[in-house]
Image (tube, rainbow, N blue to C red):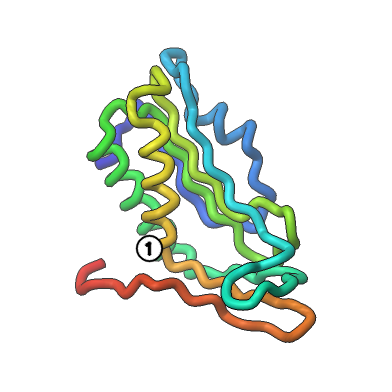
Amino acid sequence: MQTPDLPTIYSITEDEIDLNALVDAITLTATGAAAIFTGMVRGVTTRGDAHDTVFLEYESYKPMAEAKMKQVADEIRERWPVVQGIAIVQRIGRLYPRTPTVLIACSAAHRDTGVFEAARYGIDRLKEIVPVWKKEVGPGGEEWVEGDYIPKPGE
């Protein structure tokens, strides 16, 4: 469900994520709130035994990933029809600690309309169904980090 008069952005990019430009792009004259989630590269990972991370290498099959991002945006619009703008951006390539890797932003007229929940849903759903692969490289070697999601037929 693409609503032509409501801004929806979804992209896989190697470029730096520009928070200000994205918030501007999803802001309408009726917008009074934007909830934004940004994921970052950690320099110390606590998954399993704590260990240092030198960099992460993100990869994606862009056409499929962007189609799944559109699906996430459509799901947000279905569950929270008051959401005005949506931005879903995943950065790929070699990324170092303290670098933003992903951004989910939702805008609405007011903060108490579900905009926080919509943004939270967006990042959780992105992690579930958008095909992005992450390799963690540290002083002790490298490892592909796998998620827990197993797609069902048709997903």
Res. 82 image quadrant: top left
Res. 44 image quadrant: bottom right
Q: Residue at x 68, y 83 (%)?
A: 142
Q: Nearer the viewer, residue 102 or 50?
A: 50
**As drawn, is 25 to the left or to the right of 6?**
right
Q: Residues within 10 Å of mark 1 (few under 14, many from 20)?
A: some
Q: Residue furthest bottom?
A: 141
Q: Quadrant of the N terminus?
A: top left
Residue that badge 1 annotates? 128
Residue 28 vertical placement versus 44 (above, below): above
Q: Residue at x 71, y 74 (%)?
A: 51
Number of marks drawn: 1
Where residue 120 appears, as percent x and y from the top left, is 42, 44
Where residue 117 appears, as percent x and y from the top left, is 37, 38
Q: Secondary structure at mark 1?
A: helix
Q: Residue furthest front?
A: 49
**As drawn, is 109 to the left or to the right of 41?**
left
Q: Residue at x 65, y 71 (%)?
A: 57
Res. 42 image quadrant: bottom right
Q: Quadrant of the C terminus?
A: bottom left
Q: Residue at x 52, y 49 (%)?
A: 89
Disc 1 residue type (three-letter): Glu
Residue 109 vertical placement versus 78 (above, below): above
**As drawn, is 56 to the left or to the right of 32?**
right
Where residue 27 appears, as percent x and y from the top left, is 49, 24
Residue 152 vertical placement versus 87 (above, below): below
